[in-house]
Image: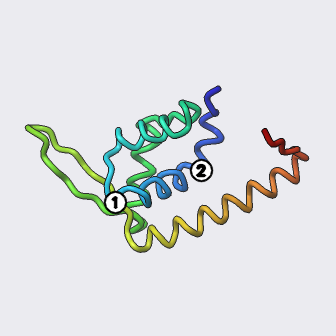
Amino acid sequence: MIYSSELIKGTLKTIVLKLLSTHTKMYGYEITQKVKELTLDKIQITEGALYPTLHALESEGLVTTETEYIGKRMRKYYSISPAGTVKTNEKVTEFADFLNTMTFLLDIKTTTA
């Protein structure tokens, strides 16, 4: 099952920041593939969703960019900034609290395998 874009939209900044916090630098396609791999294809981020998010994070000072030429092609790498590290911790904590609230609100019973 692939999660709906509606669910992913509200968590995309958190996903990208958390991923960048555990990698030195990543380029856009690499981010999409890593998320896909880590979630066993349940979350598939489109370029149309990713790049506006990356640009917003950059304008907020949460990520920095670096351009490298690979042959004749230019590749833009994204890295987390110190402010981004702080924001990542805030967003992950906020999301964990949100998850707990939704679990309670929707009366979801957790099961252990």
Looking at the rendered structure, the secondary structure element under dot 2 is: loop
Q: Residue 98 in the image: x percent, y percent?
A: 74, 58
Number of dots carrying numbers: 2
Q: Residue furthest right?
A: 107
Q: Residue furthest top?
A: 1
Q: Quadrant of the N terminus?
A: top right
Q: Quadrant of the C terminus?
A: top right
User: Residue sitting at 59 percent across and 50 percent down?
Assistant: 11
Tell me which amino acid carries mark 1: Ser
- Colouring method of the image: rainbow
- Residue at label 1? 79
Q: Residue 21 in the image: x percent, y percent?
A: 44, 61
- Residue at label 2? 11
Q: Are marks 2 and 1 in contact (CB under 8 Å)?
A: no
Measure the C-alpha gap from mark 2 to mark 1: 19 Å
Tell me which amino acid carries mark 2: Thr
In the image, 32 versus 61, the foreground residue is 32
